[in-house]
Image: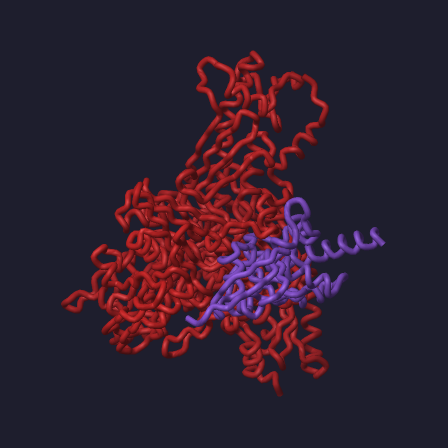
Amino acid sequence: MKDDITREERVDNLKGMGCSRKRVEDARFTQGKGNYVDDVKLDGMLFGDFVRSPYAHARITNIDTAAALEVPGVLAVLTAADLEPLGLHWMPTLAGDKQMVLADGKVLFQGQEVAFVVAEDRYAAADGIELVEVEYEELPVIVDPFEALNSDVVLREDLVAEDGSIPDGAHGPRKHPNHIFTWDAGDKEPTEEVIANAEIVAEETMYYHRTHPCPLETCGCVASMDKVNGKLTLWGTFQAPHAIRTVVSLISGIEEHNIRVISPDIGGGFGNKVGAYPGYVCSVVASIVTGKPVKWIEDRMDNLMTTAFARDYHMTGKISATPEGKITGLHCHVTADHGGFDACADPTKFPAGFMNICTGSYDIPTAYLEVDGVYTNKAPGGVSYRCSFRVTEAVYFIERMIEVLAIKLNMDAAELRRINFIKKEQFPYTAALGWEYDSGDYHTAWDKALKTVDYDGLRAEQAQRVVDFKAGKTRKLMGIGLSFFTEIVGAGPVKNCDILGLGMFDSCEIRIHPTGSAIARLGTISQGQGHATTFAQILASEIGLPADSITIEEGDTDTAPYGLGTYGSRSTPVAGAATAMAGRKIRTKAQMIAAYLLEVHDNDVEFDVDRFVVKGASEKFKTMKEIAFAAYNQAIPGLEPGLEAVSYYDPPNMTYPFGAYVCVMDIDVDTGVPEIRRFYALDDCGTRINPMIIEGQVHGGLTEALAVALGQEIAYDDMGNCKTGTLMDFFLPTAWEVPNYETDFTVTPSPHHPIGAKGVGESPHVGGVPCFSNAVQDAFRPFGNIHTNMPHDHWRIWKTANELGLHG
Amino acid sequence: MSKKMHIKLNVNGKDEEFLAEPRELLIHTLRERLNITGPHIGCETSHCGACTVSINGKSVKSCTMFAAQANGAQITTIEGIGGTDNLHPLQEAFKEHHGLQCGFCTSGMITRATKLLEEIPNPTEEEIRFGMAGNICRCTGYQNIVKSIQAAAAEMNAAKEAAE
């Protein structure tokens, strides 16, 4: 059989790994034909919405629902008293705590769910909410975690024994009624000793403010209990649909096979849609009670005020070094504000996530980290907003400490990084806080970045700017922000990563159809990352069928194999690996079929792009398309018919993407307005599957980093009122505020991942936040600034300038 | 609960007539009454633009307008801009230049961009960024949205020139 196209053309036809394949998702989205949860419409569907607490801390003395039930269209009002007989007035959190589904005698944060009004439409539900009479008795409010640890006010009476003693929490002993856990990593005494005896020690206290992932689509669900056949179908904005199915089964008692969870198109997640929220539980109960489907969709204020904040870490660091700048030790203490319930979304054994990656990209011989979790009268959450578990906090911490140390040493911060990087030959590298970094080549990336931006030229320009500023020739300062980050993503090995006891493997199941096309189903779920495009590319390269002939399906627990979902950049590292491994199983069987068809031994054929060829006789071959058909129409001795495979992949290690970012910023000291002149981002995410999508992820992650660094926060007043509950107050950058980014890359494949990929979606956020912040801080360094807290909004930048005496 | 109003709209070329409470928001009329689910609800305060539609030739955020205020109006949503057989150049360009990720803002983004290109057929990057600042995207960082609009403008201008 002769071939009329070249091998190169055959490769191109597959649209496999490494090409910028256009997205298959876009046809529906550009025509308004996406199917998001609020687009789900079922016969007789009702609408549920919450009565929420106006107080941050109060006892509830009475709830009167009578007037609400008189409203035309209102069918039911659920309170904790209604849920209690079912054991559903509280629910377990991902962090080993429990959380009220509906207020059980008291409220712990403003916006807390008090009652659930079920009505024929959202207008009737809103009318009903207005008429639910709740009597509150206000209690003292604590919004500061340090105050919480010294206060007599007990936020969680349910966690104090009758004799006043404090039982252990899910993560060990608690030292105060408002204390949740102490978690540590590394060597305490040796680190303290190194720092005590060091010639150079830099210390800094920094607050990484509370913020929110704020995807454009809020959280929501539709619960439909079919009482005839006993099946519950739950559509929702779930980043982990299988985990939600298991949780719903465990807390409701409905057998898991009778629950079908469907994540339809999701309008962005960024961590907001990982957790389980009271709205899901109430919708399920309401559907069971009314016998009708019930929809619950957050409005924006509900979203910002109640579901899944991020960050809120008070961090204190000490870093020691030799006079030449070689770092000798690092100490970090965190007071973590978790709000009224500990609902952080972290693997079970990591109550502070992977904060112990806070030694960063540096060869630091000794280190110690200690984190105290604390209850306050703020919303629960603690999700990883566009990052792996607490990795943004860790990278911000170390990248600020490096800058503070550089000031102490009177040294260039780029050079300080360079002399402390883990060297290429040190990988795999075991860090002082325990992680084994799989691979990296930091010096190459750093040198490439600094050369591309002409770092020395920038510093010379900055020095001249300082001279001009002092001479009164300009009112604008220039800042050069640097960051070098190492992420830890792809959770994770089942041996140390689980959520509610569910090991964090992931999965892929492939069915090849007789005509040589295929469907693959995964345990993950895209929220904009383009899985349907990129996973087909992985498979195309692995099994030699065109990506255009492969359908990728996710998000339906009745059809997809069990997986732990999409967050923490785990889709490519874990499910992507499962996809490659399942593809290889397909290929193994295809090899046997090809050998049979070619009448040679299995070992005498080899895979070549889209076919198996007889070794040494490439004119003799069978294409994968031919093999697929043969799998269904030939009786091959010793082989079952069909061509299918499934892989459950438990990664041997996490992956460690890294990158080098530089931001050049001008700051008007009189208005406090920063202008980003240039942003260069070099990412190393290992093997690159789709450069177009990688670049898009970097643009988006950097923009979310810009938001967090330069203005976005969830702020409270002393009464626990959330001051940033709408997009009027909560900063989301528009096209007008966002610069163009320059993207670049190096490729250091992961040695343990089947295709060497590491994940990229979160890197730009993790590396971007310190880069933007460092740019602001660097602009003020010549005038004595050491550290100021984010977010660097115009007012705070102006204030810094003012405090440094730059306003004359 | 007040008296229902008699409302007539023309949506994507089709006449619609119904009785609705005065408080019914236009986005709910479109999405729930007429099953036109392209426009989305993102903030309910006019900030995000996911609900953007064109009303009598102007870009309007339908989440903060009553259906009654639109009585008698011509409304175009993303569904009226182009379909599989007649994609608008903006729809083509957003696909070609990776101008979207999760897709939630895309309907409003493209609907707004059609009006921007009517207002300024050959916009500069600055004009695009200013003219699109009422539409928030959380995924793309806007760089490829700007690129998509520039490409569509070039395409539309070339087609216009060829026709003249």
Q: Compared with residue A696, is residue A574 higher up or lower down, i.e. above or below? A: above
Residue at the left extreme?
A163
| Camera-nearest residue between B6 and A394 | B6
> Hey, which quadrant is residue B152 in on the image?
bottom right
Residue at the right extreme?
B164
Total numbered circles: 0
Q: Which chain is purple?
A: B
Q: Position of residue A362 (x, y in %)?
A: 51, 56
> Hey, which quadrant is residue A418 in on the image?
bottom right
| Camera-nearest residue between A547 and A362 | A547
Q: Position of residue A485 (x, y in %)?
A: 53, 56
| Camera-nearest residue between A9 and A688 | A9
Kindly tell me whether residue A622 is visible in this rendering.
Answer: yes
Q: Compared with residue A18, is residue A591 higher up or lower down, i.e. above or below? A: above
Quadrant of the frame with the N terminus of chain B: bottom left
Q: Residue at x 44, y 58 (%)?
A: A219
Q: Residue at x 72, y 23 (%)?
A: A4
| Camera-nearest residue between A578 and A167 | A578
Quadrant of the frame with the C terminus of chain B: bottom right
> Hey, which quadrant is residue A279 in on the image?
bottom left
Residue at the bottom extreme?
A808
Kindly tell me whether residue A202 is visible in this rendering.
Answer: no
Q: Position of residue A734 (x, y in %)?
A: 60, 66
Image-based side of A169 in relation to A319, left or right: left
Q: Chain A: what color?
A: red
